[in-house]
Amino acid sequence: MNNLRHILVTLTFLIVAFANAQVLTLDSCLSLAKKNNLQIENAELEIQKARQVRYQALTKYFPNISAQAFAFHALHPLIEIGAQDIINGVSNDDVRSNLNQLYQDYGTDANLDKMFGFFPYGVTAGATAIQPVFMGGQIVNGNRLAKLGVEAAELQAKITERDILEEVEQTYLLILGLEAKRSTLESVVLLLDTLEQNVQTAVSAGLTTQNDMMKVALRRSETERQQLQLENGILLAKQTLCRSIGIAYSDTLQLVGDVSMLSDTEIGEPRPEHELLGLRVKAEELKKKMEIGKALPQITVGGTYAYSRIFKDKNQHNGLLFATMQIPLTAWWETSHKIKEINISTQQAMQSRQHLTEQMELQTMQAEQAVAVAEREITIAEKTRDTAKENLRMARINYEAGLIPIAELLEAQAYYAKAESELIDAQLNLRIAQRKAIDYK
């Protein structure tokens, strides 16, 4: 009755714990990483930045319109001239003498000031529009280059997302593998508990010595050390997983599945790197055309309109149309060296693309080979595990029959635990190899 009550309490506790647990599947982790991972988010922001650069380039097709205004009020007129200055400016002595006499006789009565001022205040305003007609292809090629920038940012985002999702998948499978190893060690602990009771009974009956108890104790200490390492590894891996998918870590976090699974979510398009390097070659070619365009004649047309009020009570309006042509006569010397520099960069980009192509072909072959090797390793690990399991079973029988010492039983149990761990590692390696083989196709 007490045992039944204990079982019911345990089941109730497990049900409540599971209900409150944070359960994640591999596909849900990948979906969360797409939405929450900072590196993926930054890659999307890079796409937005590249699009803004493209929009900036598009504005070069349209007129450049500017407006300006200027107003002033001087403490003193900007230009001042006296009546005597005007008279003295006459070169003929007789005329100068007559003017001076007239000013002396009638200037005061005619209200003529000795000094005359001009431009004491004023206002000017205007607007200018300049439309590029021919800029040596710089505007067209600049827009093409900006478009390539957007495509490159999109490809880089795909690469970033693929790498992050692969990392999430590997971390997820690593946790499952570590938890499987923990289950193996828990079975070892159960065996040691049973064995410790039997040895204690045998020691009490005088059938064996304390030496056997010490061997069991040493094996238990080793198992506890392994459990501690596994728990720490699981904790670190779960924290890494939570950080990658953008959620807070919880002690109740539980993962569903085993190391033999692969996600149903598409990780990413195969190898965008080659296409990205192709864009780099195109970009260098466009840069070359833009440099050539800087050395070609540049033609613009435009118009301007102006308003001014400098003289008192007199508004002035004016406007004009104009065309300009600028010919950079000395630019070809510098441009020739710039083009040679770009040609070298283009050659480097083409060689990098060729090198990457060869490298990716090699990686594809290596990935396929890795899958084949991992499959064989699993076959070997399964046989080893089955052999170790049978060896442990026989060791138990022989130990209980008194045919072998406890050291051989503990050794058989250690071989079995090691074989189980190696099988889990082989399964994990196979899933990683399979994922790379899929992505490298």
Image: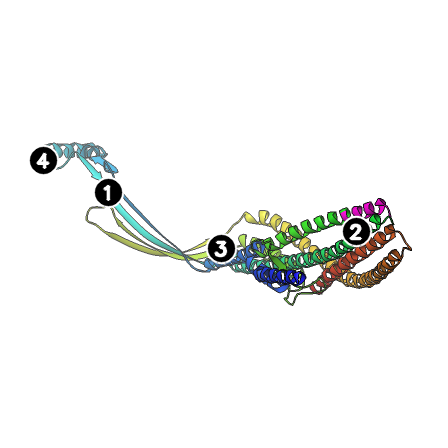
Badge 1, how many Cα within 10 Å: few under 14, some, many 20+? some
Q: Which residue is mark 2?
A: 196
Tell me the mark number nearer the camera, choosing from 2 and 1.
2
Task: Give x and y (percent) for residue 168.
Answer: 64, 58
- SS of the residue under disc 3: strand
Determine whether label 2 and label 1 are within 8 Å by CB: no
Q: Which mark is residue 106?
A: 4
Could you tell whether 333 is left or right of 82 in the image? Answer: right
Q: Residue at x 39, y 57 (%)?
A: 302
Marked residue nearer the N-terminal end (3 or 1): 1
Q: Which residue is mark 1?
A: 121
Q: Which residue is mark 3?
A: 298
Could you tell whether 379 is left or right of 256 in the image? Answer: right
- SS of the residue under disc 2: helix
Marked residue nearer the N-terminal end (2 or 4): 4
Could you tell whether 128 is left or right of 180 in the image? Answer: left
Write the start and end of the magenta stretch as one range: 208-220
Badge 3, how many Cα within 10 Å: few under 14, some, many 20+? some
Q: Quadrant of residue 214?
A: top right
